[in-house]
Image (cartoon, grey):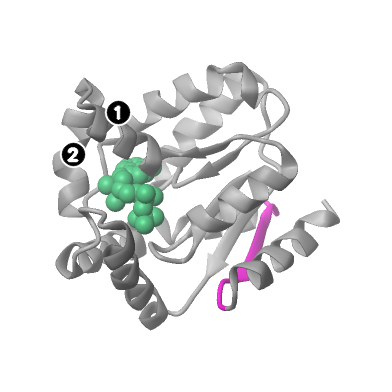
Amino acid sequence: MIILGAPGAGKGTQAKVLCEKLGIPQISTGAIFRANISEGTDLGKLAQGYIDRGEFVPDEITDSLVKDRLHQEDTQDGFLLDGYPRTLAQVGALDEILLEQGHTLDIVIELVTEREALVERLLKRAEIEGRADDTEDVIRRRMEVYLEQTKPLSRVYEQRGILVEIDGLGTIEEVQERIREAIQGR
Ligand code: ADP
């Protein structure tokens, strides 16, 4: 599965709860990058500048990270990608990775949320978590990049018939319940 949504839509939060329920790994490219940055790895050093500016890390780097991650055994019985793919090129790269590894995509969940609510949530998160890319300028840039590059992905998956749109407004439990209902039939 994939979970899509704007920055601040609640992807990470919902992904975590859903993965715990289903017993599958949550693969968050943003979290993997942040872990590498705090550990000071080469990958972290490569990614940091892009992330601090609110830009995407180049596709070659992100694609190969996901490819390696999906090679690990815990993905055999399913997984949820959170924060990947984020560009049309990444959609193509993912298709190849999945084909090679014998996986298929079943469901793409899109969390739909109003823009105003998003910026507010991100600014609140900045206070709580202190993430370096949660300053107002960088948030605005991430929003622009999302609309330009990531939003078009939902149409691709809609045409494949695997997109489910979920209203992202409400409590964590309410949204989780909507997700669970929507994927139950599949
Ligand atoms: P959010 O969804 O709130 O923007 P993430 O934790 O998913 O936060 O991502 C943080 C940052 O990590 C992104 O702004 C981007 O710089 C980088 N990143 C994460 N996933 C990708 C990806 N698939 N492709 C390129 N860059 C990525």
Residue at image position (15%, 67%) is 137
For disc 1, the marked residue is 61
Question: What is the crowding at mark 2: few (fewer than 14 residues within 10 Å), some, or many (at least 20)?
Answer: many
Q: Quadrant of residue 29?
A: top left
Q: Amino acid at mark 2?
A: Gln
| Residue 30 falls left or right of residue 68 | left
Relative to 41, 118 lies left or right = right
Q: Quadrant of residue 161?
A: bottom right
- In reply to whether residue 51 is colored magenta, the answer given is no
State the residue at coordinates (57%, 49%): 16
Q: The N terminus lies in which quarter of the figure?
A: top right
Image check: 44 left or right of 183? left
Which residue is at the front of the view, 30 or 94? 30
Is residue 19 rendered to the left or right of residue 59? Answer: right
Q: Quadrant of residue 93?
A: top left
SS type, badge 1: helix
Q: Which residues are magenta?
A: 160-169
Q: Tell which of 49 and 104 is nearer to you.
A: 49
Indicate the position of residue 160 as horizontal and vertical percent values.
66, 50
55 lies above or below 60: below
The image shows residue 173 at horizontal and vertical percentages of: 66, 68
Examine the rendered structure and indicate whether residue 158 appears above or below residue 137: above
Q: Earlier in the sequence, mark 2 or mark 1?
A: 2
| Disc marking residue 48 | 2
Residue found at x 62% / y 58%: 158
